[in-house]
Amino acid sequence: MKVLENHSLKKLNTFGIDAAAKYFVEFASIDNIKEILSERKFSTCNKLILGGGSNLLFTKNFDGIVLKNELKGIELLKEDADFYYVRTAAGEVWHEFVMHCIKNNYAGLENLSLIPGNVGASPMQNIGAYGAEIKDHFYELEAFHIGDKTIRTFNNSQCKFGYRESVFKRELKDQFIITSVTFKLLKNPKFNTSYGAIEKELEAMNIKEVNIQAISKAVCNIRRSKLPNPAEIGNAGSFFKNPEVVKGKYEFLKINYPTIVGYELENGNVKLAAGWLIEQSGWKGKTFGDAGVHKLQALVLVNYGNAKGNEIFDLSQKILESVKEKFGIELEREVNII
Ligand code: FAD
Ligand code: EPU
């Protein structure tokens, strides 16, 4: 294992921000982690666990050690009459893992196809898309405690999953390195095609009999048509969360803004489309140097080349303030600001 100094992170974050890590190391085993942390210099400095870098915005160089996760391996742990229990190392690429599941007819993750990043980050914000979230099929995870250097297991309820939330973003922030995640996947698929344009896309694909392969393909097609590909335009997906408001607030807004987009939740509140709020505040397609708001999806901030992290951050702050002024709603950033 080689610890690199002043290492560029430009190719390691999907925003393509030119930041550097004071120290940088890749780990491929738990022994590797222990070895690095046994050095006082590294055990005492700031640490950042890096997966695919697709949910981060670097606003400055990282003054500490970046630990890049390269833990690999997928294993069918056990099966019973209804489920497959599949454990995957945290450094596996999420979409490749989903493809592995689909190939083996392990059902449940197909709606989450093509989300960038690694498996290890998926529980951090309980990744979700097209009517599914990982918590629906999550069994348990293992994580290395940076302080006492032991491995702990967390079951579904211990992770305290919510919408783009988990205990690892809150009470246990920066304390653990997630090393593996086990999913409980279905032997008999339950197709979930009601969300967004999935059914329309399946029809366009001329699918007569739905299966998990077709759903995955439909989701990939929709995502490719809507979201910028980070290989072409730097971005980290949705920059803000979709805000939840009480129904009264939604109905009040609807009087002045009849086209406002909102989805009623089980708790009676309404989830508003932040993309709509940002578009109506006049930001869609705007550019400021190389920083901008995507022209097809106002929830996605982009780097057209050489934007600095703090230029993107400043743009997000202006958006936040203008949405607050127009609608009285405070957006919350979804991307992790470093
Ligand atoms: P990173 O960006 O590397 O890290 C994210 C955070 O997790 C950081 O705080 C990091 O320190 C921490 N972390 C990473 N790995 C570990 C670990 N092993 N242990 C402890 N902490 C860790 N997200 C969705 O939920 N739904 C979507 O539909 C979606 N669409 C996207 C589309 C695009 C085009 C892009 C660019 C992003 C999208 N995202 C989406 C966001 C992103 O893909 C997810 O958040 C993903 O899980 C991030 O994975 P990563 O490995 O890149 O994490
Ligand atoms: N909309 C606009 N203008 C825009 C963008 C969106 O009016 O510029 C409105 C449209 O009415 C559209 C609605 O908002 O129908 C919802 O848009 P979309 O289907 O693109 O989804 P989203 O709410 O913007 C969320 C997630 C995405 C996830 C998709 C699909 C959040 C913060 N974002 O986006 O996740 O892929 O739904 O399920 O919840 C991510 O987290 O990075 C991410 C991309």
Image (cartoon, rainbow, N blue to C red):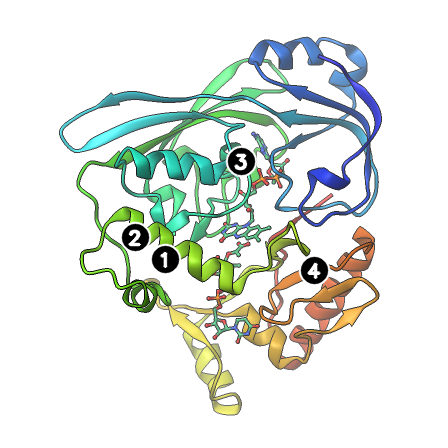
Mark 1–mark 4 Cα distance, whole angstroms, equals 25 Å
Q: Secondary structure at mark 2?
A: helix
Q: Secondary structure at mark 4?
A: strand
Instruction: State the image quarter where residue 145 is shown.
Output: top right
Q: Which residue is mark 1?
A: 218
Nearer the viewer's eye, disc 1 or disc 4? 1
Q: Which mark is residue 214?
A: 2
Q: Residue 293: image x %, image y %?
A: 69, 67
Mark 2–mark 4 Cα distance, whole angstroms, equals 30 Å
**Toward the viewer: 311 or 217?**
217
Q: Which residue is mark 3?
A: 118
Query: Residue drawn 65% across and 33% down?
Result: 50
Nearer the viewer's eye, disc 3 or disc 2? 2
The first of marks 3 and 2 along the sequence is 3
Q: Is residue 170 visible?
A: no
Q: Which residue is mark 4?
A: 302
Q: Is residue 218 visible?
A: yes
The first of marks 1 and 4 along the sequence is 1
Instruction: Say whether mark 3 is within 8 Å of ligand 1.
Output: yes
**In which quadrant is the N terminus drawn?**
top right
Q: Residues within 10 Å of mark 4 (few under 14, many from 20)?
A: many
